[in-house]
Amino acid sequence: MFSPAAFISFGLLLAPFASAAVHDVTVGAGGLTYSPEAISAVPGDQVVFHFQPKNHTVTQSSFASPCGKKDGGMDSGFMPVAANVTDNFPTYTVTVNDTEPIWIYCAQAANTPSSHCGAGMVFAINCGADGSPNSFTNFKNAALAVGASLASAAPSGSAAPGYGYPSASGTAPQATGTGTTTGSATTTTHTVVVGGPGKLAFNPPSIQAQPNEVVLFQFQQKNHTVTQSSFGAPCEPLAATSTTGQNGFDSGFFPVADNTTTYPTWSITVNDTNPVWAYCKQKTATGSHCGAGMVFAINAVDSSAKNFSAFQAAAMKINGTSANSTSGGASSSDAVPSLHISTAVSVGLAAVGAAFTLLL
Ligand SMILES: *[C@@H]1O[C@H](CO)[C@@H](O)[C@H](O)[C@H]1NC(C)=O
Ligand SMILES: *[C@@H]1O[C@H](CO)[C@@H](O)[C@H](O)[C@H]1NC(C)=O
Ligand SMILES: *[C@@H]1O[C@H](CO)[C@@H](O)[C@H](O)[C@H]1NC(C)=O
Ligand SMILES: *[C@@H]1O[C@H](CO)[C@@H](O)[C@H](O)[C@H]1NC(C)=O
Ligand SMILES: *[C@@H]1O[C@H](CO)[C@@H](O)[C@H](O)[C@H]1NC(C)=O
Ligand SMILES: *[C@@H]1O[C@H](CO)[C@@H](O)[C@H](O)[C@H]1NC(C)=O
Ligand SMILES: *[C@@H]1O[C@H](CO)[C@@H](O)[C@H](O)[C@H]1NC(C)=O
Ligand SMILES: *[C@@H]1O[C@H](CO)[C@@H](O)[C@H](O)[C@H]1NC(C)=O
Ligand SMILES: *[C@@H]1O[C@H](CO)[C@@H](O)[C@H](O)[C@H]1NC(C)=O
């Protein structure tokens, strides 16, 4: 977040007679975020937080425990702001007394899968430079890891399918105790944005991840899924084509309204370095999202024939149908040979009540 250059100018500001500055920060504008996310400030400066609609806090935590209130730390308390408020937003002011880092989070829905902090709603004053241990990036990743472990610890469909689970974080149908350390600042989280206005894509569409790392999907506008498939059948659930009885993961649909600024998230934990292939299973009257190239991969090997581009091209070639892409798109001879009863479980997480969570 901060370059060495920023620290040089920071040093200059410490010169005698420097006057105190006021730093304005908006809270919750355009999503679960503080804007800017991190600032440098000198003793005497004031940081004024402007609370936008919804219901957020400015609460002090520590680097080690990003989503937990620091004993004796600052806390604005909840600042509910009605959706129709457009100016004169309520404020909370923090006076900076020294050059020590100050770590801040939003305490809304703390310790639940809908935790704002767990979705990355954190802020810092005088954090370390990028690349240093106490950088803002590391702080935010630690907060996202807390969110991911809250999501995977939520009661889920591992025993029974979690129909309509009313959580902004969805469920983790693979909740099999993958051993991710709860709240550990060392867990790496990869955030992938799903959809958004006019976007039929995962961003980034292809990532490399190590075992036990977390992939956090943030569902933006429209109504998407992240559903595991296979390289050979990009637009079909893995359950329908697996010859070894694998169900594969499936987030279920996450409908997100156009005017929403709160994006639900859903996460998986990476088990190994084998490639993982996935797609959005949404189909509309005008075509399927998978056929439009809305596919995703973890640990695809760029230098092999089974690379991400080949996977995406195959999805588009078969236009989102369940045809076996390796046989030219017309074959139906592979029609669900291993389909069995548990297929219903893997697709059971339908229609999450996202509207329910918009108030948080
Ligand atoms: C704001 O959020 C807090 C904590 O979730 C809740 O107790 C309070 O009722 C909310 N206020 C409004 C007006 O929604
Ligand atoms: C916002 O809506 C509430 C209730 O719908 C109303 O009482 C209030 O006057 C409105 N405020 C503004 C600024 O429009
Ligand atoms: C700075 O000191 C004042 C007075 O002791 C205190 O109220 C305030 O919380 C301190 N600011 C921070 C960021 O700790
Ligand atoms: C990891 O393994 C579990 C248990 O087999 C499975 O449910 C989950 O989908 C796997 N995760 C990925 C990313 O494949
Ligand atoms: C697709 O067809 C090819 C050739 O017939 C076969 O080797 C492959 O296993 C099939 N893939 C799937 C996912 O059924
Ligand atoms: C989301 O898409 C699914 C599948 O097309 C559909 O059943 C569901 O009604 C959609 N939800 C909303 C809120 O549009
Ligand atoms: C979003 O739009 C829908 C339909 O127009 C409306 O019912 C809802 O109140 C809006 N939500 C927000 C947060 O503005
Ligand atoms: C792809 O499928 C959609 C229907 O899902 C159809 O309208 C469209 O014409 C197809 N495109 C091609 C190139 O076949
Ligand atoms: C990706 O796969 C395709 C098809 O298998 C192949 O033609 C292409 O050369 C591969 N790309 C790389 C960089 O190896």
Image: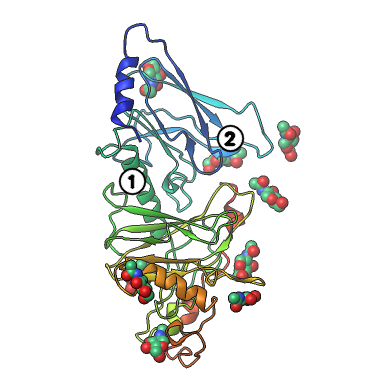
Q: How is the image coloured?
A: rainbow
Instruction: Give coordinates of residue 158: x percent, y percent.
Output: 41, 71
Q: Residue at x 56, y 57 (%)?
A: 199
Report the front residue among 145 and 67.
Answer: 145
Amino acid at pointer 2: Gln
Quadrant of res 135: top left
Residue at which label 1 appears: 142
Q: Residue at x 50, y 32 (%)?
A: 77
Instruction: Give coordinates of residue 263: x percent, y percent.
Output: 53, 51
Q: Which mark is residue 25?
A: none
Report the front residue among 311 and 241.
Answer: 311
Quadrant of res 15: top left
Residue at which label 2 appears: 52
Q: Secondary structure at mark 2?
A: loop
Q: Secondary structure at mark 1?
A: helix
Left or right position of 147 against 81:
left
Left or right position of 159 against 263:
left
Amino acid at pointer 1: Ala
Q: Classify 22 as above or below 339.
A: above
Q: Classify 242 as above or below 286.
A: below
Q: Classify 352 as above or below 358.
A: below
Circles 1 and 2 in contact, beta carbons < 8 Å:
no
Q: What is the CA distance from the residue labelled 1 to the residue labelled 2?
A: 25 Å
Q: Earlier in the sequence, mark 1 or mark 2?
A: 2
Q: Residue at x 40, y 74 (%)?
A: 248
Instruction: Give coordinates of residue 35: x percent, y percent.
Output: 49, 34
